[in-house]
Image: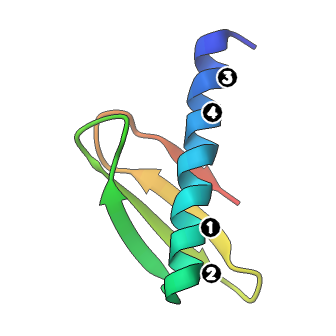
Amino acid sequence: MPDQVRNSFATTIRDALKLKKVMIARGLTRAQAKCPECDGMVQGRLAGPKNHMRFWCDGTCKRSLME
């Protein structure tokens, strides 16, 4: 796997888990924050009894992740 792809995947996981941790601590099921990679907003939603995460950025980086 090329380094650029690996680094992009690692930062996406890092940011998604950070947002999920904050959401669970505050008791939220939906949240958004400024994207550290671009000028957009990252958004997260928790669903189900196990709090599965849907994470995406609406900015230029277009990162996304589903747990």
Within 10 Å of the Cα at label 1, are there few (<14), some (14-19), or many (20+) other Cα atoms? many
Q: CA distance from mark 4 to mark 3?
A: 5 Å
User: In the rendered image of this protein, does residue 58 appear above or below residue 23?
Assistant: above
Number of dots carrying numbers: 4
What residue sits 56% from the left and 36% below the top? 11
Vertical comparison of 52 with 4: above or below: below
Name the kind of residue labelled 4 in the image.
Answer: Phe
Which disc number belongs to residue 2?
none
Mark 4 packing: few (<14 Cα in 10 Å), some, or many (20+)? some
Q: What number is the disc on residue 9?
A: 4
Task: Residue type at mark 2: give it.
Answer: Ala
Which comes before the other along the chain, label 3 or label 1? 3
Residue behind mark 2: 47
Q: Secondary structure at mark 3?
A: helix
Element class at badge 2: strand
Tag in front: 2 or 3: 3
- Residue 47 horizontal side relative to residue 60, left or right: right
Could you say which disc has been placed on residue 6 in the image? 3
Q: Please state the horizontal and vertical placement of residue 16, each as a whole percent of the image.
A: 56, 55
Q: Are marks 4 and 3 in contact (CB under 8 Å)?
A: yes
Residue lying at 49% horizontally and 85% vertically, measured from the top left? 26
Q: Quadrant of residue 24?
A: bottom right
- Tell me the crowding category of disc 2: few under 14, some 14 to 19, or many 20 or more residues within 10 angstroms, Cα based: few
Identity, as a three-letter code, of the amino acid under mark 1? Met
CB under 8 Å between discs 3 and 1: no
Residue 14, above or below 29: above
| Disc sitting over residue 53 in the figure | 1
Give x and y (percent) for residue 52: 69, 72
Residue 32 vertical placement versus 58 (above, below): below
* Whole-number angstrom distance, CA of label 2 to CA of label 3: 27 Å
